[in-house]
Amino acid sequence: MFKTRFTDMFGVAAPITCGGMTRVGKVELIAAVANAGALGFITAHTAGRPEDLAKAVNRCRDLTDKPFGVNLTILPSITPIPYDEYREAIIESGVHIVETAGNNPQPHLPRFKEAGVKVIHKCTSVRHAVKAQSIGVDCVSIDGFECAGHPGEDDVGGLILFPATADKISIPIIASGGIADARGLVAALALGCDGANMGTRFMATVEAPIHENVKKQIVANDERSTNLIFRTLHNTARVAKNEISDEVVAIETRGNATFADVKDLVAGTRGAIVLDEGEMDAGIWSAGQTQALIHDIPTCAELVSRIVREAEEIIRGRLGAMAVV
Amino acid sequence: MFKTRFTDMFGVAAPITCGGMTRVGKVELIAAVANAGALGFITAHTAGRPEDLAKAVNRCRDLTDKPFGVNLTILPSITPIPYDEYREAIIESGVHIVETAGNNPQPHLPRFKEAGVKVIHKCTSVRHAVKAQSIGVDCVSIDGFECAGHPGEDDVGGLILFPATADKISIPIIASGGIADARGLVAALALGCDGANMGTRFMATVEAPIHENVKKQIVANDERSTNLIFRTLHNTARVAKNEISDEVVAIETRGNATFADVKDLVAGTRGAIVLDEGEMDAGIWSAGQTQALIHDIPTCAELVSRIVREAEEIIRGRLGAMAVV
């Protein structure tokens, strides 16, 4: 069993999160993560409209009596997105933990605080973590260069980003990116964090609502099986390496890529950025460098209990034996 | 006190190295590192010709009775470099630990083995670490994306590279890149390594033979104060960010850089890649992302004893309290 500022704040047994993942953070996975003793997040936009999100929360509550949260990613959009309605749906559905990502969550903080909702803000830089603390979020999830999805443009590895963040803020910190097993969890705790996010790792679980071929490919992949795309658009995303993401990189390397070029290419692959179709080589899906460390497809319960048990062994066994009194 | 496969193999008290650094790995620093209980490496090429290296080893031995090593970096060169003579100088001078880097050290291994010299080979990828073990080196130093100098072209963070390497080889592993304090050392040990290299950290010590302004700049810099240069030449180097390295990046970003262009620019800055001149902004010097974690200029003895003490506290205190029995 673990006791950190993270487990205390959120009332979960394991200092592990399954942070918001577009098209992956659905009820069946998040309930399984909760029942395993970790903290998962239903992804609001993937759930659908605000009323669909409320229904998803209720369905999740039918499946678990343990804490879970909702991810609310705030992005600029041509079509206005009803963020206030999502926020109110979260509050009304009785969820007490929200993970915000993307833009500054400040406009939503007073209502969340009033309703007793704890807010975790996802950042990719020390300066944004400092800003997040200053506006009053309860916890920061800090995403390093190794992560799946959007690592930002600074390219700072977690080995540096985690302790550098811990040096600058006093609220609990979730280390994110580069962590998929007990070794990484203990490293994150040693580096000054209070818990660890393991997105790609939870994609390769029995309960993850993605195609079996994607899970198998994650297991087959290694530390070099990712590409950074949209780099030239200053909207970098780390995705699984395959023919399509290689082609996006090639377009960008030629130096004259526009957003339209890259979007057209991706859109031309039978359904844009896909996670849930059989022919996954036809699509682009987020995956972190942790693919190197993922060798099986366990249930969430098996995964979390294994990580916790092995982390205890590393601390009391391996490290304890190395630090000779 | 620490006891790992690294400390056992090399007979040192702390699982910490000051690996070979061009223009920095000189006798005064390496003797101070040895006296502090860590393992430093005199850089052969910086010492001069093979006979100068032998003299440097003798001077170092006058300054310490603790173990130290020699770094032998093997690179293709237009002017032939007498590697065999360096190797024999190392053996004849009685040094028992060598760090090889660059090309495959295989041609030199039989003589080193015969003479009882332990060989640590520096790699930047899992596949090269596997190869190094297969040819019979005693230990691997694995360098992640965050490191100063040459991180290779794979861009894999230490959080992944260290455990992925530990999964594939059975000889002792030194984690390198991204580590500058006790937190990083414990993380490296948790991730499956047996010790940690801290190059940039040792540059900011009293005994490092570099200009005070460089040391102060390392302290002032943060996690974003590096540039990756020579990327277009497939010979990437992580260096301190300044006007000159920014200009190299700008040339390369324009996409038409040749080796000559970049070399000319660097050569035009009053003395090529410099570490030892007053106006350091005029030059380019290697530095890792760990600059974010370096806040002082201690002696080597102060540094090593602090890291060891704090690492013990993290293991027995912080982590021990988190892993509730």
Image (cartoon, coloured by chain):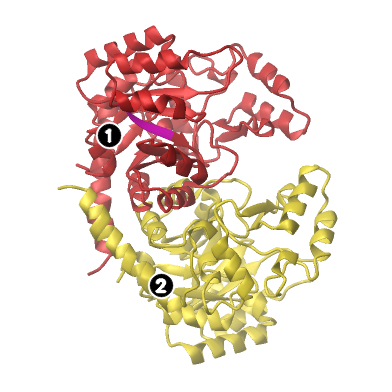
Chain colours: A red, B yellow
The amino acid beneath tag 1 is Val
Q: Quadrant of the N terminus of chain A?
A: top left
Q: Which mark is residue A260?
A: none
Q: Is residue A120 magenta?
A: yes
**In the rendered image, which residue does mark 2 sit on?**
B304
Q: Percent from the top left, x then y, of residue B245?
A: 72, 56
Residue A278 higher or lower than B49, as above or below? above
B316 with respect to A120 (left or right) = left
Q: Quadrant of the C terminus of chain A?
A: bottom left
Q: Percent from the top left, x then y, of residue B323?
A: 21, 48
Q: Residue at x 41, y 31 (%)?
A: A199
Q: Residue at x 71, y 63 (%)?
A: B284
Residue B182 higher or lower than B319, as above or below? below
Q: Residue furthest bottom?
A: B62
The amino acid beneath tag 2 is Val
Q: Percent from the top left, x then y, of residue A251?
A: 73, 28
**Residue closer to the observer: A288 or A280:** A288
Q: Secondary structure at mark 1?
A: helix
Q: How many marks?
A: 2
Circles 1 and 2 on the same subunit: no
Q: Is residue A63 magenta?
A: no
Q: Which residues are magenta?
A: A117-121
Q: Residue at x 49, y 18 (%)?
A: A275
